[in-house]
Amino acid sequence: AARAVVVVAAGSGTRLGIGTAKAFVPVAGERMLVRALRTILTLPEPTIVVVVAPADRMDECRALVTEVAGAAGEYTTIVPGGADRHASVQAGLAALPDSVETVLVHDAARCLTPAAQFERVFDAVAAGLTVEADAHAIGVGVVPALPVTDTVKRVTGDVVVETVDRSALVGVQTPQGFPLAALRRAYAVAERAETDDAGVFQAAGGVVRTVPGDADAFKITTRWDLGRAEAVVAERAA
Ligand code: C5P
């Protein structure tokens, strides 16, 4: 397959207050990682999947992938994650064959992200590789984005400095897509300060475009998010 998805699932879930790896927490009876993988397995084109798992839960992760993927599991690799998301993504990228042209990096914690969002990102990366090959020699990165709905203020301590023009702001989600070789190079030279893959790519000189995100692609971080996810699942089943 010329395309791949790296699913980072090695986070600890401290903010969920559960004391267990977050991706292994059930949402309405099914673990986040299982939900994320089920969606990825519905993608029509062959897609290599790398799951970045907590180092102490590799066996459990392998069993879970076999359960979800069945025969398609042969396209799935599991590697141990690192101390932070940055290190986990690098571990995932290192596990991919060089023949992969486009890679998407996805948070397992965004386990309700619709398949259509993966396709939008794959399509936009492919368009960047062909149409803009000359303009941006390394291709473009792609992030799903949604408008910011709250009023946003810049603050110093508890003092409001100014209102930030929200028409110029978006919130970004995953999966974020890139030409594999370019993303690997970006990670190789990156400082650790970036909070997402597009930040790493851009810091290395890459151009990043947005495609529309989806409200269901929110990241489950807190207990409240978990409740929201369960409501989305219930609504989909109704
Ligand atoms: O902690 P946060 O919610 O920002 O993590 C986002 C994603 O990165 C999660 O899917 C989490 O499992 C993953 N992660 C990881 N390795 C880490 C930290 C986070 O794979 N060391």
Image (cartoon, helix red, strand yellow):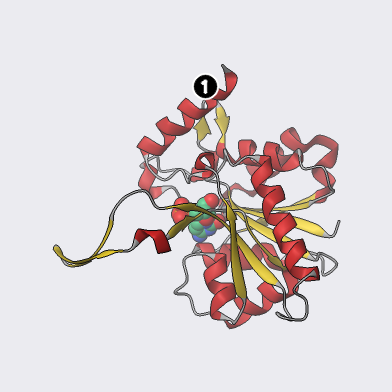
Q: Horizontal and vertical percent for residue 225?
A: 41, 38
Q: Horizontal and vertical percent for residue 157?
A: 16, 67
Q: Is residue 28 visible?
A: yes
Q: Residue at x 41, y 64 (%)?
A: 168
Residue with the mark numbered 1? 234
Position of residue 130 in the picture relative to residue 213 (left or right): right
Could you say whether the residue bearing mark 1 is in a helix, strand or loop? helix
**Occupied quadrant, residue 99:** bottom right
Q: Is residue 11 visible?
A: no
Position of residue 139 in the picture relative to residue 47 (left or right): left
Instruction: Specify few, some or many for label 1: CA neighbours under 10 Å numbering under 14, 14-19, or 20 or more.
Output: few
Q: Residue at x 82, y 70 (%)?
A: 98
Position of residue 154 in the picture relative to residue 6 (left or right): left
Nearer to the camera, 53 or 234: 234
Q: Quadrant of the N terminus?
A: bottom right
Nearer to the camera, 184 or 213: 213
Q: Horizontal and vertical percent for residue 236?
A: 57, 24
**Occupied quadrant, residue 43:** top right
Q: Relative to 170, is 58 above or below?
A: above
Q: Quadrant of the C terminus?
A: top right
**Occupied quadrant, residue 105:** bottom right
| Residue that protrudes farthest toward the top in the picture | 238
Q: Relative to 42, is 90 above or below?
A: below
Q: Horizontal and vertical percent for residue 82?
A: 55, 63
Residue at mark 1: C-beta within 8 A of ligand 1: no
Q: Could you tell me how many numbered marks the image carries?
A: 1
| Residue that protrudes farthest toward the left in the picture | 159
Name which residue type carries label 1: Ala
